[in-house]
Image: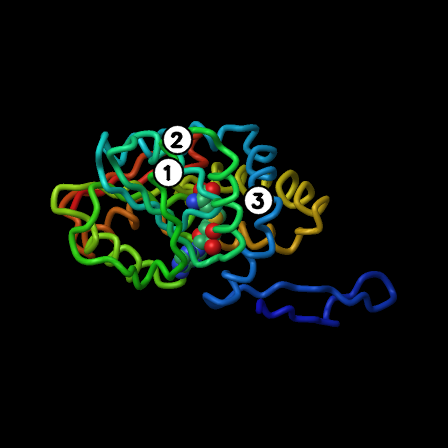
């Protein structure tokens, strides 16, 4: 369970007002957080990005280089947006795995699969597990995506090393996430949008604390250059980071 830390330390006016502070430190905290937000996650994504996340996800899948008949993996699949796009791309002769450690997110993903009539979605398999310990043999996949996932993984180095290991030589991982900009103006605007739009909207769903975590998670994340460096360190042969969505999002493309 996530640790809910009750603190009496904040003063508001002349009286003490207890504040509830959500501390997200370890993998289990993050797992619990994603289980909790699962029921509203898709609606909030549409609302908060004004539907733009769908475009960024299409770009991410396209950058993965996946083609018809391929065997592909979507790590940290959540409710499956990227997995469904992968599935359409590889078609009925291909195979797509959606992989996540949140049972609730996977339940929503598999319900969405059942509700959709597209027969190619039969090529999808959902699997529960940790991105830092992928249960696949070396060189299993023709392409891998990880969307808004790497930022949330506690040991990013291990997760990227695992992705590199399960990719076939010459194949690509496409890593979509918020961009941790080195431009102070972009960072300020990004933080203002989170404080003034994202958190207030999420609080309407009772998830204020959960979405406050977004700002700190971007702060703790890696810049484009650092992501490229990480990819090369774990064994990818090339790595290039692209800024998208007015520089608020980023996509790393790395080839094993
Ligand atoms: C922000 S969601 C992104 C979901 C989806 N890829 C999308 O773009 O909509 C991040 C997902 O990463 C998963 N996750 C975080 N750390 C993980 C880990 N170590 N192993 C597996 N899944 C993880 C969470 O459960 C959550 O579903």
**Distance from the alpha carbon under mark 3 to that under mark 1:** 24 Å
Is the CB of the residue bearing disc 3 within 8 angstroms of ligand 1? Answer: yes
**Distance from the alpha carbon under mark 3 to that under mark 2:** 25 Å
Residue 20, image quadrant = bottom right
Q: Is residue 160 shown above or below 172? A: below
* 22 to the left or right of 82: right
* 140 to the left or right of 124: left
Residue 72 image point, x, y percent: 27, 42
Q: Secondary structure at mark 3?
A: helix
Q: Which mark sits nearer the N-terminus, 3 or 2?
A: 3
The reply to whether dot 2 and dot 1 touch (C-beta < 8 Å) is yes
Q: How is the image coloured?
A: rainbow
The reply to whether dot 3 and dot 2 touch (C-beta < 8 Å) is no
* 66 to the left or right of 4: left
Q: Residue at x 44, y 30 (%)?
A: 245
According to the picture, the residue beneath numbered tag 1 turns out to be 122
Is the CB of the residue bearing disc 1 within 8 angstroms of ligand 1? Answer: no
According to the picture, the residue beneath numbered tag 2 turns out to be 119
């Amino acid at each position: 369970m996530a640790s809910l830390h009750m603190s009496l330390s904040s003063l508001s006016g002349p009286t003490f007002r207890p504040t509830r502070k959500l501390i997200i430190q370890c993998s289990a905290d993050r797992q619990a957080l994603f289980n909790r937000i699962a029921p509203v996650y898709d609606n909030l994504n549409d609302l908060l990005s004004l539907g733009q996340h769908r475009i960024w996800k299409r770009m991410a899948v396209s950058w993965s280089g996946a083609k018809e008949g391929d065997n592909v993996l979507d790590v940290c699949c959540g409710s499956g947006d990227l997995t469904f796009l992968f599935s359409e791309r590889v078609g009925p002769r291909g195979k797509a795995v959606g992989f996540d450690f949140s049972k609730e997110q996977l339940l929503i993903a598999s319900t969405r699969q059942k509700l959709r009539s597209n027969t190619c979605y039969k090529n999808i398999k959902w699997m529960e597990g940790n991105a830092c310990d992928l249960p696949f043999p070396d060189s299993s996949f023709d392409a891998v995506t990880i969307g808004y996932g790497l930022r949330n993984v506690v040991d990013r180095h291990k997760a990227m090393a695992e992705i590199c290991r399960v990719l076939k030589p010459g194949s690509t991982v496409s890593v979509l996430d918020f961009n941790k900009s080195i431009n102070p103006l972009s960072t300020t605007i990004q933080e203002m949008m989170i404080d003034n739009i994202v958190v207030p909207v999420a609080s309407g769903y009772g998830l204020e604390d959960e979405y406050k975590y977004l700002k700190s998670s971007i702060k703790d994340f890696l810049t484009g250059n650092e992501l490229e460096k990480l990819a090369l360190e774990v064994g990818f042969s090339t790595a290039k980071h692209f800024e998208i969505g007015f520089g608020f999002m980023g996509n790393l493309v790395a080839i094993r």
